[in-house]
Image (cartoon, coloured by chain):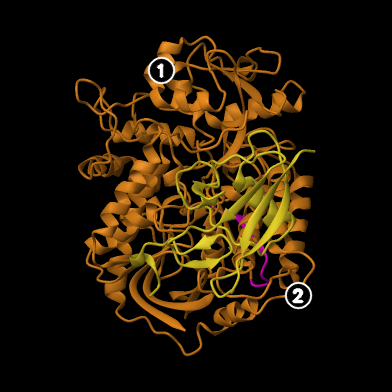
Amino acid sequence: MPTARLSVRRGTANDREPRYDDFVVPFEDGATVLDGLVWVRTHRDPSLAIRYSCISANVCKECTIVIDGRVAYACTTRLRADATMVLDPLPGKRHLRDLVSETRPPREQLD
Amino acid sequence: MTRLDTDVLIVGAGGAGMYAALAAARAGAERVLLADKSLVGRGGATIMAQMTVAAALAEESPDDPQLHLADTLAAGRGLCIEPLAAALCEEAPARIREMEEWRVGWARRPAGTIAQVTAPGHSRPRCCYVDFLNTGPAVAATLRRQVSGVAAIRRVGNLAVTDLVTADGAVIGAVALDTAGGEPVTIAAKATIIATGGLTRLYRRSSASANMGGDGYALALAAGAELVDMEFVQFFPIGHLAPRLVGMDPIMWDPFRYKLGGRLLDGAGNEFLATYGSDEAGTYTTPRDLATYAITREVAAGRGSPHGGVYLSFEHVAHDALEAAFGPVVERLARHGIDLTQKAVEVSPIAHYHMGGIAVDETMATTVPGLFAAGEAAGGANGANRLSGNAIPEALVFGERAGRTAAAFAEARGAAPWPRGAEASAVARIERLATGQAGAIAPAVRLDELRDLMQEEVGPFRNAAGLARALERLKAMRDELDGLAIAPGRVCNPGLVDWFELRGSLAAAEAVAAAALARRESRGAHQRDDFPETDPTWARNQRVRTAADGTIAAARGP
């Protein structure tokens, strides 16, 4: 079965050095980066923190991350067979954990 | 620990929750807390709806809310709780016109009238929309704008309510998990509205947001409230199956069908709906429950398409007609390699909406003082089968009623008492789980398994043996909760969030399975292989509640 490789930024803002974990995920035609991340959470590492809501309808925009250096939606970016994609949290936002950054509008935060 | 204090707490910030917040503030509540475990106005079902909204506006042809009600009751197969259905139909026009004042942008005819189409099950053109396939996002954006302009409404995202807090049999607030920081939060509330949507995320194939796992039902049950009609999960018959399509709602094909016609074909290219007593003759009038039945039967008989559905074909429609009806959408489909004039797509039933929910009266009050429900989370208006286009009016109309009622309740109640330690067990659980839990299996794995279990045994077709298997497995999964693996950590700990989601999902799933097992007949969205006929003596609603021993049980109402 064809696969794709995701190199995913891990850890919190407290870590001194950025750390990346590589995951090999199943690839099929049309599969997305979000499909790969959800597969990792179920089958490899349930502690991987990601943000998503609408699951590939692309209406909630919660899954916005950096994919190979460019800001993109995980749910509409296709996986590439036999390639490694590097995933980072959004720049310019407070990093919380793994691929999650503080994307709540300031007025929608607890304090 | 953060302690919040509010007049009206609203759990869930989708269409119903946002409207409830507006209505509560409008009715005089000075402090409204609108909390969502996702982001405010980004999750839930409303934003996913690419289709139509039913309201007897009479813009295109004569119409009346009573005619809308008659269609709603007919679709509901004798089970709609009529005062709720009537409220939905009677107040829909005012809510829809108000949305227009708020510049939602309903599609209009060249003559200037709001365009209304005839969606399946409606006796006349009644369903308006925002082009192109943008109804839900436009409604959600409009409500977000309105909510953000009201000073009395405090919005908080990533706040997942884990428990309602009760005292003397009444709800006095909630304990929540701040999922970003991993800390417990207590919320004292004079009135609480559950607007968490439905439970379609329990199924393998669904059109739901990630946060539609039925947690609001679990909260209500645990607080002592009753649920109604839990066995009725609507499967949308022609959910997109193949080729893979992203960035589109999987139920997007419906308006294509009723604007352009669209033929459902079996794997060999033959029309089959007539075999099931629905001869569409080029129209699109087959109700959702019957279409789901026909498609599932065809697939089971080995006559399906390669991916296990049937074909939806527009090959007979000219490219110009497609372009005129769907403009930029045709272009988006082309980018996915789909040319409807050349090749049929594959579709199959997909969990889409839950008719059942928290039992409420016409004011949206539940059976527990201080607790209200709105939108899809509230059950009863749609009976055994929801009429197309009724979900967004339900969100807005019930949201309005719930917000208004809850504000009045809060004012009459004054300060709700908060007995010392009322929050203690719920807070302690969050604290304990945040330190991690030892186990071999993660909650995420069980959530994944749950979706297959529900799809297989508690899907559109059920029988006693499968439902019993499901109930047994659900109970075992519930017993296992304290032994599931959670990595320690507070900040954005997904294991912690998964655990609470699983706990809620299991209770909601058990409620569906228990009600489905008890209903020994077939009606609307509930089809039993072992009881294929509709039984007139079953023309009544079932209530579900938690018994003293913790089991979730269904009982037939009058």
Among the chains pictured, the one given orange colouring is B
Instruction: Indicate the amino acid at tag 2.
Output: Ala
Find residue B324 and report its horizontal and vertical position in percent: 37, 17
Toward the viewer: B30 or A105?
A105
The image quarter containing residue B90 is top left
**B92 on left or right of A24:** left
Chain (yellow): A
Say which residue label 2 marks.
B438
Q: Would you place residue B320 above or below residue A23 in this image?
A: above
Give the residue furthest to the bottom: B420
Where, by quadrant of the figure, is residue B148 drawn? Answer: bottom left
Residue occupying image coordinates x 59% and y 63%: A98
Residue at mark 2: chain: B
Find the distance from the CA under tag 2 to the CA under tag 1. Answer: 57 Å
Chain label for disc 1: B
Q: Secondary structure at mark 2?
A: loop
Specify the label residue B323 is tagged with: 1
Rendered location of residue B437, percent (x, y)? 71, 75
